[in-house]
Image (cartoon, rainbow, N blue to C red):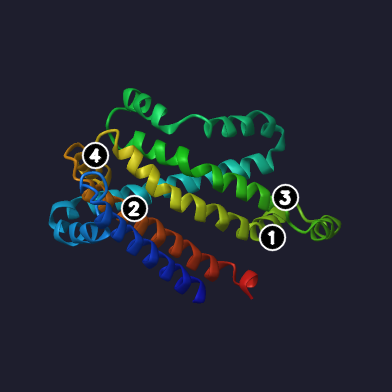
Amino acid sequence: MKYYLKFALFMVVLLVIWEVLVKVLNVDSYTLPAPSAIVQAFFTGYPDYKSDLVPTVLLVLEGLFMSVVFGIVMAVTLHLIPTVEPYIYPLLIMSQNVPVIVVAPLLVIWFGFGLLPKLIVITLVCFFPVTVSLLEGFKSVDQDLRKYMLISGATRLQIFTKLEWPGSMPFLFNGLKIAGTYSVMGAIISEWLGTDKGLGKFMIISQRAFQVDNVFVAIVWIIIFALVIFGVIRLLEKMTVRWKHD
């Protein structure tokens, strides 16, 4: 609790400094609005952007689900079939070195303006932490327990389901926390490809109209969504991996 209290106090100090500097230096609102102006736009402009919130939330959840499934499948495949790892793992690393903003227009050309290219963008952004973390978890299980199970006649599938998979849960949730926070950013980038509703569209429209306060409003909502997802994943971790916290 003290940790979050210190952070809250630190943020208050930063916002006060921001507010004072904007007023003292007489910075134009279309260059950098004051926090008070952003808060005002956050509440007074809610009727204008409320219809953009739900589409972004749904896109984040769908993209995160697809990313988690793909990441887990890749990690399990590379672990259970180690002969394919030298061929597949470098491709996974390469996928993280290609700027998503460059690939995104190509996805529109290949798959159109529907939901699929948006989900692919989010998956490209989010799956890698899940895959890497889970692979590390598989390799970090107690080797003595593995040897004991082999001596006891356990099959490869039994070792995986009884030892490796449960033992890798803390690593999986570490990857999920990273992927969860990245998923919101991935959703916003995917909405820049073209959409009727969403915070990404609201942000672009605000930029073109030089409504910088609304751009910051969108950023605030992005932060809120990311924090909520992180909190939910952490709660699920405490409920699932109770032995770690005990």
Q: Where residue 203 appears, x then y in whole percent?
A: 25, 43
- Mark 2: which amino acid? Ile
**Residue identified by numbered label 4:** 204
The answer to whether 114 appears left or right of 119 in the picture is left
Residue 215 appears in the rendering: yes
**Image quarter of residue 185:** top left
Comes first in the chain, label 2 or label 1:
1
Q: Where residue 224 appears, x then y in whole percent?
A: 35, 59
C-alpha span from label 3 to label 2? 35 Å
For image coordinates 49% across by 29% down, the residue present is 98
Comes first in the chain, label 4 or label 2:
4
Q: Within 10 angstroms of label 3, few (less than 14), some, or many (20 or more) residues?
A: few
Tag 1, which secondary structure?
A: helix
C-alpha span from label 2 to label 1? 38 Å
Comes first in the chain, label 3 or label 4:
3
C-alpha span from label 3 to label 4? 44 Å
As rendered, which of 234 and 138 lies closer to the eye? Answer: 234
The answer to whether 230 appears left or right of 157 in the picture is left
Q: Are marks 3 and 4 in contact (CB under 8 Å)?
A: no
**Image quarter of residue 47:** bottom left
Mark whose residue sits in front, 3 or 2: 2
Q: Are marks 3 and 1 in contact (CB under 8 Å)?
A: no
Quadrant (top left/top right/bottom left/bottom right) for the C terminus: bottom right
**Image quarter of residue 75:** top right
Tag 3, which secondary structure?
A: helix
Mark whose residue sits in front, 3 or 1: 3
Q: Residue furthest front?
A: 24
C-alpha span from label 3 to label 1? 14 Å
**Residue identified by numbered label 1:** 162
**Residue identified by numbered label 3:** 139
**Residue identified by numbered label 2:** 222
**Above or below: residue 226 compared with residue 244:** above
